[in-house]
Image (cartoon, rainbow, N blue to C red):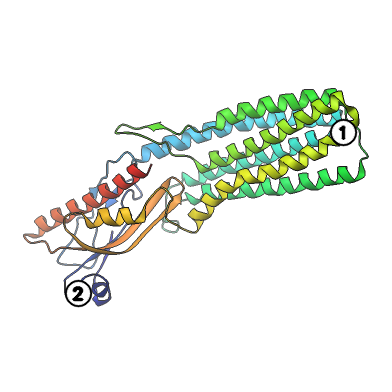
């Protein structure tokens, strides 16, 4: 908590009333605690050695560590399956002379690359904060998700271009049986990877049953797999048609073209969330006015201003606010205890907002 006092602050808070404004982010510091300290104020000092711990299930760093560990396990397993089958699909596409299968293999390559980016971003986000990177490296996860989305856009553009070339030239032959077997395996493998990466909507904590947090990197990888599943299913349909009706070989580029467009739609939700985080918008699960009302309802709070709510990642919101508190009477130690109680109440109130939001 950073504390400031001056005429400018008073004009924004209470006319003629002595005020002190607190700036902070209830929830976590470097060690998962809310720390109160007021530099430069002789009349009110909080012990720098005293940490105020907010024992909310949301504020606990253990849950975040568990989530990241689970995310890494999912990505490791899905990456291994993706790499193995991508090699097999390239071979199958070569023998089948199918552009659709080869481009599906390229799509798998993009999936694999995006998972590697996601794993790297999870490793970066687990690094401890420094004096330069005060909030840590949590945004690495968001940047990884953004790169993942952009990569699928690039691959989709290539698929559309190649499909148009085939429709125009018509100079190609396809081995129906090889295409059918390979595309059938592709659908099965993508379903398996989708199950591995799927995140259920509920999680358990020691204090409550709430909606589980979603890891953005795993979610981005899941969208990649869903997009590839859609394309693989389209390739399977094309393979069935071509197997029974070889003269309908043009179905191969048509399916590639149509399903590539559909894949783009699957990335829009993630892109919207990523942009909201990067633009430091209020998380969609938190109501700004509700947080303001709860803070004003706390005993000892006279007024607030400069309330800001943003997020480091989709599942990790942060709050800062300037608060005018009432004048505390009594000895210095008593004042310190009263302010510590107030800060703890603020922490609990914001944590309660997050519990209700999730």
**Measured from the top left, where is residue 87 in percent x and y?**
75, 30
Residue 171 occupies quadrant: top right
How far across and how far down the image is residue 209, in percent? 34, 32
Residue at point 33% right, 56% down?
289
Q: Position of residue 51 (x, y in %)?
A: 24, 49
Screen quadrant of the N terminus: bottom left
Residue 292 in sight: yes
Q: Is 272 rendered above or below residue 189? A: below
Q: Nearer the viewer, residue 247 or 37?
A: 247
Viewer-side residue, 127 vs 163: 163
Residue designated by label 2 = 15
Q: Where is mark 1, residue-wise?
A: 249
Left or right, 100 with respect to 26, comes to right
172 above or below 153? above
Up the image or down, 308 lies above or below 141; here it is below
Residue 310 place in picture, x, y as percent: 41, 55
Q: Residues within 10 Å of mark 2 (few under 14, many from 20)?
A: few
Instruction: Tell me the residue at 36%/52% (across/down).
Output: 287
The residue sitting at the left extreme is 330
Q: Alpha-carbon neighbours of circle 1 within 10 Å: few (<14), some, or many (≥20)? A: many
């Amino acid at each position: 908590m950073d504390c400031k006092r001056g005429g400018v602050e008073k004009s924004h808070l209470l006319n003629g009333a002595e005020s002190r404004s607190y700036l902070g982010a209830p929830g976590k510091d470097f060690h998962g605690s809310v720390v109160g300290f007021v530099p430069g104020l002789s009349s009110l000092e909080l012990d720098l050695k005293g940490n105020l711990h907010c024992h909310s299930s949301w504020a606990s760093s253990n849950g975040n560590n568990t989530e990241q560990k689970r995310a890494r396990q999912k990505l490791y397993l899905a990456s291994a399956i993706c790499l193995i089958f991508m090699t097999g699909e390239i071979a199958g596409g070569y023998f089948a002379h199918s552009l659709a299968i080869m481009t599906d293999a390229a799509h798998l390559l993009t999936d694999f690359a995006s998972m590697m980016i996601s794993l790297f971003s999870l490793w970066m986000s687990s690094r401890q904060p420094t004096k330069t990177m005060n909030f840590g490296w949590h945004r690495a996860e968001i940047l990884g998700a953004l790169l993942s989305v952009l990569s699928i856009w690039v691959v989709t553009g290539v698929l559309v271009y190649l499909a148009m070339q085939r429709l125009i030239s018509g100079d190609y032959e396809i081995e129906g049986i090889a295409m059918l077997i390979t595309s059938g395996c592709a659908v099965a493998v993508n379903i398996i990877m989708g199950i591995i990466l799927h995140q259920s909507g509920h999680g358990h904590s020691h204090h409550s049953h709430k909606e589980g947090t979603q890891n953005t990197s795993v979610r981005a990888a899941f969208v990649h797999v869903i997009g590839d599943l859609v394309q693989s299913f389209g390739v399977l349909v094309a393979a069935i048609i071509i197997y029974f009706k070889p003269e309908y070989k043009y179905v191969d580029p048509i399916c590639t073209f149509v399903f590539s467009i559909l894949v783009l739609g699957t990335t829009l939700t993630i892109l919207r969330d990523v942009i909201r985080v990067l633009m430091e918008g209020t998380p969609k699960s938190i109501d700004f006015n509700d947080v303001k009302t709860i803070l004003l309802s706390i005993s000892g709070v006279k007024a607030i201003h400069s309330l800001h709510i943003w997020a480091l990642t989709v599942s990790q919101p942060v709050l800062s606010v300037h608060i005018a508190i009432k004048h505390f009477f009594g000895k210095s130690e008593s004042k310190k205890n009263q302010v510590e109680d107030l800060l703890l109440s603020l922490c609990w109130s914001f944590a309660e907002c997050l519990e209700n939001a999730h």
